[in-house]
Image (spheres, rainbow, N blue to C red):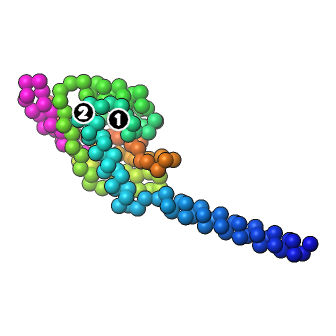
Amino acid sequence: MFITTTVSKTTTKILFLILAIGTAISTHASEMSDKELSAHINAQNTKFMVAFNNKDISDIVALYTKDATFMPANQPTHKGHAAIRAAFVSELGGPKLNLSIKTQSINRHGDIAYEIHNWDMLITLDDQTQIKDNGVAVVIWKRQESGEWLMHVDIFNSNVAVNQK
């Protein structure tokens, strides 16, 4: 009886240690370094710019969490995929737009990261008149179970006065 109990306690301790080490390795392996996170978010921003400039609303919406909040300048807040889709249908239904994004900083806190970026947009009207707009945005990214980071909160402001656009 004594040997069985000792082996059992020792075996339990070993199994617990193996499980703990395995969990730590698995958790560490799923974590991105700051450099990898920055590259991932920049790749997501590139996908966003391509989709935006091509007016591909499905690809835009796919970059947001299902319960995301989108807060464009001088417009109401849009919550969830359906509302965000409707906002982009309205936004992209007009003239040709060419958006570029340049990340200034990314800070991570667990499964949440926030990004500050500058953006520039060239708006080309039907008569080929061009209007330049630019501003700043704050995006809160949320890591999904798959490891992918999606926009959870997206708010931007324009540096150009409304009456100058």
Asked if the magenta segment contains residue 135, the reply would be: yes
Identified at 49% across, 61% down, the residue is 29
Mostly what secondary structure, the magenta segment?
strand
> Residue 77 or 87: which is nearer the viewer?
87
Asked if the magenta segment contains residue 100, the reply would be: no
Q: In which quarter of the image is residue 104?
A: bottom left
Looking at the image, residue 143 sits to the left or right of residue 122; the answer is right
Q: How dense is the environment of label 1, judged by Cα within 10 Å: few (below 14), some, or many (20 and up)?
A: some
Q: Quadrant of the N terminus?
A: bottom right
Identified at 39% across, 46% down, the residue is 140
Looking at the image, residue 131 sits to the left or right of residue 8; the answer is left
Q: Position of residue 130 (x, y in %)?
A: 9, 33
Is disc 1 in contact with disc 2, using a CB cutoff of under 8 Å? yes
Mark 1 / mark 2, whichever is N-terminal? 2
Identified at 46% across, 35% down, the residue is 66
Q: In this view, does 86 lie above or below 110?
A: above
Q: Which amino acid does label 2 sit on?
A: Asn
Q: Which mark is residue 30?
A: none
Q: Mark 1 points at which residue?
A: 59
Q: How dense is the environment of label 2, judged by Cα within 10 Å: few (below 14), some, or many (20 and up)?
A: some
Q: Which amino acid does label 1 sit on?
A: Asp
Q: In which quarter of the image is the C terminus?
A: top left
> Residue 156 or 162: which is nearer the viewer?
156
Q: Mark 2 points at which residue?
A: 54
Disc 1 is placed on an element classified as helix
Q: Can residue 77 be seen in this view?
A: no
Q: Is residue 114 visible?
A: yes
Report the magenta residues as a range.
120-136
Q: Where is residue 116 in the image (x, y as percent from the top left)?
A: 30, 50
> Residue 77 or 16: which is nearer the viewer?
16
